[in-house]
Structures are given as C-alpha cells and as structure tokens.
Image (cartoon, helix red, strand yellow):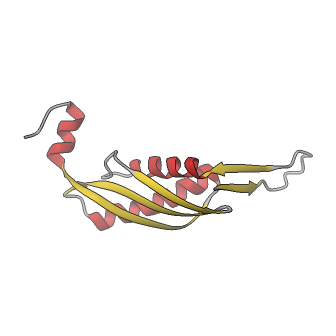
Amino acid sequence: MTAAITAPDTGTETTGTTTVSERAVRRIAAQAAREVAGVEPDVTVQAAMSGERAELTVRLPIRYPLPVAGVTEECRRHVVHRAHELAGVIVTGVDIVVTALVPESRTAAARSGRRVR
C-alpha cells in the first residue's frame, strides 16, 4: 500500500500527488529509530498504510542498562516526527517490541570489532 499526499496549493500551475510506498515508510521509520540514543542497529519495522496514515510496529534492541521506558518513548516520538517530516505520513500508532537488552560491553566490543566471551 502507498500513501498519496496532495501538495498544498502554492499558486503554481503544476499540481499532482506524491505517493510514498509502504517500503519507504518502513525504511524511514527504521532509520529514525536508529537515530535514538540507546537503540541498537538491528531494527525492523512493519507498516499498515491507509492513505496518508500509517500504523507501525517497530522491533528493536535497546542498550542495557538504559531505561527501557525512556528509550522507547523517545523512539516513538522521534519515529512519528521523522515519518511526517520526511514522507508526509501521519503516524496514528507505534507499537514497540523490545527484542533484546544488549549489555554495554557487547555494544562497545561490536564497535571496536572485538569478540566478547
């Protein structure tokens, strides 16, 4: 499904619609989630589109010991904002599933390329 967005009248003669695919919305939402401090890179998103509106399910790992409630609330707010800012989509709901709590030692090791035992 895609979202058709009608541009506001700017006084020009060119009119039309912009269509944003469900895949694009999923990718924008996943990248937005990754931009939040404490969210690890392995993010997946499902989107249910209805016109310009989207319901999202975001599956993500969170860095431990950061507060899960704080990270997920910031993630929800940021995903809604960025989806509207970048795609013009109105996000009506964001369900977040925390798939893992990743210890800080593992995230530091992954960034450095070391293995943690």
Residue located at (56% from left, 55% from top): 83
Which residue is outermost to the front? 1
- The x and y percentages for residue 82 are 53, 53
Q: Residue at x 88, y 45 (%)?
A: 14
Q: Name the residue rendered at 39%, 64% in the picture.
A: 96
* Vertical order, 44 against 73 (above or below): above
Viewer-side residue, 17 vs 67: 17
Q: Quadrant of the N terminus?
A: bottom right
Q: Is residue 109 left or right of residue 95?
A: left
From the top left corner, tell me how far across and down residue 86 is, in percent: 60, 49
Judged from this view, the residue extending furthest toward the right is: 13
Q: Quadrant of the C terminus?
A: top left
* 6, 50: nearer the viewer: 50
Name which residue lies at 21% across and 43% down: 107
Check the image and name the residue furthest to the left: 117
Relative to 106, residue 97 above or below:
below
Q: Return the x and y of residue 33 as percentages of the image width and height.
A: 42, 52
Relative to 59, 19 lies left or right: right
Q: Nearer the viewer, residue 62 or 77?
A: 62
